[in-house]
Amino acid sequence: MTEIINTTGRRKTAVARAYLKQGSGNVMINNKPLDDYFKDRDYQAKAINALTVTDNLDKLDVKVRVYGGGLSGQVGAVSLAIARAVVAYDENTRSALRGAELLTRDPRMVERKKYGQKKARKRFQFSKR
């Protein structure tokens, strides 16, 4: 099977497109190896957590294009995209990924700044006189 599975993941303002196919466990993000793109070990582990949970780390090749947001948002987007791709590859992994909370899209976004205020919730200092 040389079918390529294409899925999308989002987190904050980051968007990731994951392309998954059978292979030897090669993970590329924006044409860089995983450990070159995400230097932090925690970020690396979180990004490929879906492959680790389903024991597909050495069976599938993943290529990801990610843009927007910062590193934290990009890691979440990559994680969700890979998890969705693994489910599309093998539907039997859905319960394991659902149990590890990897298929839930985190809806939290930055609150917009309001006029007449310093930030979204912070006000200017009140002066009585």
Image (tube, rainbow, N blue to C red):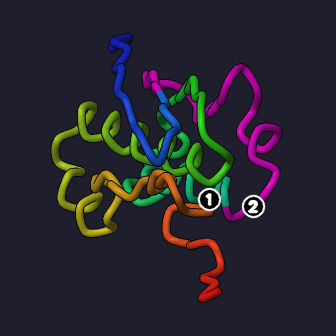
96 in relation to 19, above or below: below
Query: Which sits in the foreground, 116 or 52?
Result: 116
50 in relation to 6, above or below: below
Query: Which sits in the foreground, 106 or 22?
Result: 106
CA distance for labels 1 and 2: 6 Å
Direction bottom: furthest residue: 128
What mark, if any, has residue 45 been given in the picture?
1
Query: Which sits in the foreground, 74 or 116?
Result: 116
Q: Is residue 118 magenta?
A: no
What mark, if any, has residue 41 been given in the picture?
2
How many numbered callouts? 2
Q: Position of residue 109 (x, y in %)?
A: 42, 53
Judge left or right: residue 92 versus residue 89.
left
Q: Position of residue 11 (x, y in %)?
A: 45, 46
Judge left or right: residue 37 versus residue 115.
right
Q: Position of residue 10 (x, y in %)?
A: 41, 40
Name the residue rendered at 46%, 25% in the picture: 17
Magenta residue span: 17-42
Name the residue rendered at 50%, 56% in the picture: 49
Estimate how packed mark 2 is, as few (under 14), some (14 to 19) or many (20 or more) residues with alpha carbons within 10 Å: few
What mark, if any, has residue 97 been given in the picture?
none
Of the 4 image quadrants, the one containing the N terminus is top left
Judge left or right: residue 72 versus residue 86.
right
Judge left or right: residue 83 versus residue 96.
right
Q: Circles 1 and 2: CB distance less than 8 Å? A: yes
Q: Quadrant of residue 102?
A: bottom left
Q: Position of residue 63 (x, y in %)?
A: 56, 24
Q: Amino acid at mark 1?
A: Ala
Direction top: furthest residue: 2
Q: Amino acid at mark 2?
A: Arg
